[in-house]
Amino acid sequence: VGQGILVHTYQDAFARHGLACGQVLLTPGDVVDRTRYLNARHTFDRLLELGAVPVVNENDTVATDELRFGDNDRLAALVASMLHAQVLVLLSDVDGLYPARPYGAGGAVEPIDRVDDFATLDAQVVGPTASDVGTGGMASKLEAARIAAFSGAHTVIANARRPDVLTHVAAGKHLGTWFPPSRRRPESRKLWIAFAPVPQGRIDVDSGAVRALVERGSSLLAAGIVDAHGEFAAGDAVNVVGPDNTVVARGLTTYSTDDIRQIRGRSTEALAAELGVAYTREVIHRDSLVVVA
C-alpha cells in the first residue's frame, strides 16, 4: 500500500540535490544464481552510467523465511561485493563498534577505532543481533564488514545521526569503526561461493584436511571427512568445519549428505575398488571452494 509513497519520497529527496534514483528489489536468488547475478550487476552498472542512484531493498513480496537475506547489512555487503565497491558504510544508532556495551556508561566508553582481525572480537563486543531501528544489530554489521573486507572493500560503522556522516566518510575523514580490506580480493566466482548461497549443511573434517585446504589449496577429498550434517544435495553450498568447530572453508559439494556419510574417511583407491570410479571425484573441487578461516 505504501510502496508508491515511499518511492515518491525517495525521488523528491534525491531531486532536491539534482539527482535521479531508481529502485532495485533483490532476492537471494539474484545473487545465488550466476546468470541472475550477472544481470543484476549489469542493471546496477547501467543505472550508475545514467547518473541514477540505485535504492536497494529486499523484495519482500516473494521472499520467504527460508530464503531471504535476513537483514539489510548483509544485502548491502553483497551489493558492494557485486559492484566492486571501494567503501561500504553501515549506519547505526551508536558511534561504532564498542569494546563493551556503551549503555549506562555516560558516554565514557569510546568506540573501537579499527579492526584488523575479526577473530579477536568476542561475544561481548558483538552484542545483540537486532536493534530497535533495523532488521540487524551489531552482529549483522560485523558479518557484513567481513563480507566487504573479503571482497576488497573498506567498511565503516558510524552513527546515522552524525551530521554529514556520509560526506565525511567519502572525504576520508576518520570516524566510527574502520575495517580495512583484505590484502587480495578473490575472483568474483569465489566471492559468490563464499557469501551468496546460504549453506545447506556442514562437512566436518580432520586436522589433516584442514592443513591441505588452508596451506596447500587442495580440493576436499573423502579421506579427510569425519561426518556430514544437514540435508543437502550435490551442487549445494556447505560449510567445511575443522576439529575445533571453526568454519575453515565454504564450497559447492559434488555429493549429497547420504553419499558423503557413505564415503567419509576412505581413500580414493578404496572407493574406486569398492564403489567404482564415480565415487573417486573430489567432494569439493578447489575451484568451487573458498578458504574463509
Image (cartoon, grey):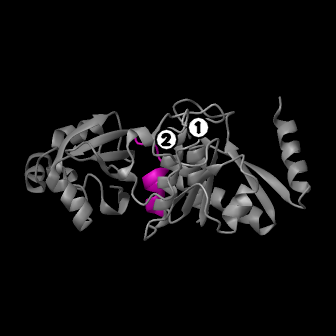
Residue ID at (64%, 31%):
132
Per the rendering, the mark at residue 106 is 1
Percent across and percent down for residue 193 are 44, 54
Residue ID at (54%, 64%):
153
Q: Is residue 230 visible?
A: yes
Which stretch appears magenta?
Answer: 189-199
User: Where does label 2 land, which residue?
Assistant: 139
In this rendered view, identify the residue nearer to me: 10 or 104. 104
Is residue 34 left or right of 55 when viewed as pictured? left
**Badge 2 amino acid:** Ala
Q: Secondary structure at mark 1?
A: loop
Q: On the rendered image, what quadrant is the N terminus found in? A: top right
Binning the other alpha carbons within 10 Å of mark 2 as few (below 14), some (14 to 19) or many (20 upward) gives: some
Q: Secondary structure at mark 2?
A: helix
Residue ID at (23%, 42%):
260
Prevailing SS of the magenta stretch? helix
Any magenta on residue 192?
A: yes
Counting residues from the N terminus, which is met first, the one under dot 2 or under dot 1?
Answer: 1
Binning the other alpha carbons within 10 Å of mark 1 as few (below 14), some (14 to 19) or many (20 upward) gives: few
**Badge 1 amino acid:** Gly
Residue ID at (86%, 60%):
19
Q: CA distance from mark 2 to mark 1?
A: 23 Å
In the figure, residue 262 lies in which quadrant? top left
Q: On the rendered image, what quadrant is the C terminus found in? A: bottom left
In the figure, residue 236 lies in which quadrant? top left
